[in-house]
Image (cartoon, rainbow, N blue to C red):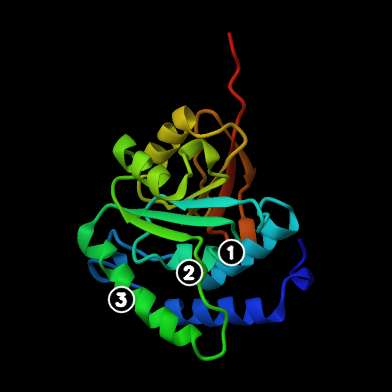
């Protein structure tokens, strides 16, 4: 889907949202701490690429952020996906989502497009079956229904192992935070080492399982 097929109101809204979040990046221990936030400007370029190549279909795509922080990536992606779901392990970070949501709702009330009902952020462990069942009980979405999984580089290899066992073959795994050296994951094919053209986001696809 080309950008021209999406409304100008939509792109104005997500551009304002991206600038808002990029003005409040965080690191738990200074700028080099373990907690880092994705650059929303970068993700908008990533979204354009994924729309253009058909990886994202706004009427069908289910997106899951495996470490959603304050929910900013999920809020942005909710404008482009049928479902945008996030799971955040740390209680104190998850609690920030509610403050961010209030701020975003106020920002969007100034003539921009509001967030929809396709957004779900939960406090839990994205590696835990109980959390997966909680997501499914609220949204009706299981891991095998997810089209795009997303994570910052933290635990990227651990998540890949989990997805190789539990996700649907053909689903996509998008990892933010790499530059020159990209990992290879068992069961995945690297489709695009530079989605969006910023040398930060790599896109993988889970291979079909071969029955022996």
Residue at the extreme top of the image, as rendered: 212
The residue nearer to you, when weighing 64 against 45, is 64
Specify the quadrant that holds the N terminus: bottom right
Label 3: which secondary element: helix
Percent position (x, y) of residue 81? 59, 58
State the image quarter where residue 195 is shown.
bottom right
Q: Which residue is mark 3?
A: 99
Picture residue at 50% right of the left edge, 72% below the top: 115
Can residue 23 be seen here? Answer: no
Name the mark nearer the viewer: 1 or 2.
2
The answer to whether the residue labelled 1 contacts the one labelled 2, judged by CB atoms less than 8 Å apart, is: yes
Query: For the residue carrying disc 3, how many other residues have a C-alpha within 10 Å: few (<14), some (14-19), or many (20+)?
Result: few
Picture residue at 28% right of the left edge, 49% below the top: 124
Question: Does 189 sit left or right of 65 as displayed?
Answer: right
Above or below, comparing residue 127 to residue 104 in the picture: above
Percent position (x, y) of residue 180? 53, 52
Sequence-first disc among 1 and 2: 2
Q: Which residue is mark 2?
A: 39
The residue nearer to you, when weighing 128 against 39, is 128
The answer to whether the residue labelled 3 contacts the one labelled 1, judged by CB atoms less than 8 Å apart, is: no
Question: Does 75 sit left or right of 15 as displayed?
Answer: left
The answer to whether the residue labelled 3 contacts the one labelled 2, judged by CB atoms less than 8 Å apart, is: no
Sequence-first disc among 3 and 2: 2
Residue at the extreme bottom of the image, as rendered: 110
């Amino acid at each position: 889907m080309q950008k021209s097929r999406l409304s100008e109101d939509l792109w104005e809204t997500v551009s304002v949202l991206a600038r808002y979040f990029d003005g409040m990046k965080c690191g738990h221990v200074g700028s080099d701490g373990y907690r880092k936030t994705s650059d929303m400007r970068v993700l908008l370029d990533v979204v354009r690429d994924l729309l253009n190549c058909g990886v994202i279909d706004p009427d069908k795509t289910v997106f899951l952020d495996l470490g959603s922080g304050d929910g900013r990536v999920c809020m942005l992606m909710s404008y482009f996906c049928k479902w945008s779901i996030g799971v955040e392990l740390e209680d104190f970070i998850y609690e920030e989502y509610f403050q961010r949501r209030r701020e975003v709702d106020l920002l969007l009330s100034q003539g921009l497009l509001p967030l929809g009902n396709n957004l779900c952020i939960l406090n839990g462990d994205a590696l835990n079956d109980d959390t997966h069942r909680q997501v499914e009980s609220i949204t009706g979405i299981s891991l095998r229904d997810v089209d795009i999984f997303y994570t910052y580089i933290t635990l990227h290899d651990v998540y890949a192992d989990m997805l190789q066992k539990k996700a649907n073959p053909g689903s996509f795994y998008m990892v933010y935070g790499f530059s020159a050296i990209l990992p290879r994951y068992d069961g995945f094919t690297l489709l695009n080492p530079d989605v969006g053209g910023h040398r930060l986001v790599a896109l993988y696809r889970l291979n079909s399982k071969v029955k022996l």
